[in-house]
Amino acid sequence: MISWIAGSGFKQLGARLFSGAAVIRPALSLTPGCAGMRTAPAAWVASVRFVGTAPLMAETGGAAAEGKKEKAVVSYWGMAPAKLFKEDGTEWKWSCFKPWDSYSSNLSIDLMKHHVPITWGDKLARWTVKTLRIPTDIFFQRRYGCRAMMLETVAAVPGMVAGVILHLRSLRRFEHSGGWIKALIEEAENERMHLMTFMEVSQPRWYERALVVSVQGIFFNAYFLAYFLSPKLAHRMVGYLEEEAIHSYTEFLRDIDAGKIENVPAPAIAIDYWRLPPNATLRDVVVVVRADEAHHRDVNHFASDIHYQGHELRELPAPLGYH
């Protein structure tokens, strides 16, 4: 009797809590050996538990009219994304970034700047980066498309690691970050977009994918520990890493100009992300990517200088808005 009352009350409560969607109630059954005792099947209990978050699928009108069955998620919470359009009126097709994330790269940035190592920390950071370059040169040689892909999988890690550490520190200390959290996460996202671009140019082989997994696992943990122990050393190392990236992309451009690498049309994602002209080529993509790396070089050397001078990053505003 008590079970029946509880079950009935649960049904009424479920109808009130999950009124945003229809609750499917299977027919109740009589349990053998318990005459007159009504119990709800497990399937009904599960449907009540998840009915508030279960997505409903509906066909979009435009696609259905063309004979395509394109599915869209209909939710009580109204999270369906709005359609966006480019300046020429065509529909925006990228979900990984939005029109306001695109930008024209600053090509006037000085590519030749170099931080001369002075302290033992600078020399250690420089030596570490030079040492890591040796196996990369041996493995990839002059296959710069695959080399760029591998480079970006590593270059996208430091900004994310540093941003997460600063984010947690800001929460623990109840203090502002000076914009450095956003700047570092922005750097990581920019490096990831480099990777998404070069994935269109050079499809990695299975052993290159395996190498990426191995290197990322080692580098993420090593850099996390390095940043936790010495942010100034970690930022300096990334600054030198970006200097090496500028050198690699310069060599990439030389091979394209010499005809050793075909100057194919730029991927569509690159044209929209960097606001390149429709007839842009691979060379144009490498030029803007190299400019991005030069900016990341300056940001990380600047961050390291802040620490070397006895300050914290939050004391000076981050160089945001380079887009």
Image: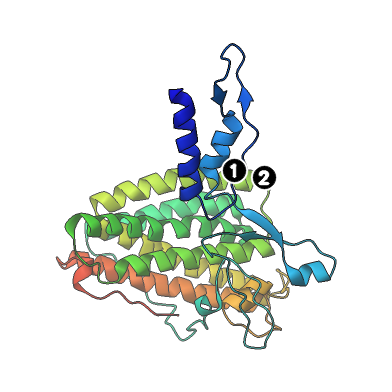
Name which residue lies at 67% across and 81% down: 280
Callout 1 amino acid: Ala
Name the image quarter holding residue 184: bottom left
Percent position (x, y) of residue 302? 29, 71
Q: Is residue 123 visible?
A: no
Circle 2 residues within 10 Å: few <14, some 14–19, many ≥20: few
Residue 206 is tagged as 2
Q: Residue furthest left?
A: 310
Query: What colour scheme governs how the chains and residues are painted in the rendered image of this protein?
Result: rainbow
For this rendering, which residue is in front, 309 or 46? 46
Q: Is residue 133 left or right of residue 33?
A: left
Percent position (x, y) of residue 283? 64, 77
Q: Is residue 236 left or right of residue 172?
A: right
Callout 2 amino acid: Trp
> Which residue is identified by label 1?
210
Name which residue lies at 65% across and 85% down: 277
Residue 311 is tagged as none
Name the image quarter holding residue 183: bottom left
Q: Is residue 13 visible?
A: yes
Percent position (x, y) of residue 36? 57, 19
Name which residue lies at 63% across and 83% down: 86
Q: Are marks 2 and 1 in contact (CB under 8 Å)?
A: yes
| Secondary structure at numbered mark 2 | helix
Q: Is residue 52 left or right of residue 301?
A: right
Question: Is 118 situated above or below 254?
Answer: above
| Secondary structure at numbered mark 1 | helix
For this rendering, which residue is in front, 213 or 84? 84
Label 2, label 1: how far apart the Cα atoms are: 6 Å
Name which residue lies at 71% across and 74% down: 263
Circle 1 residues within 10 Å: few <14, some 14–19, many ≥20: few
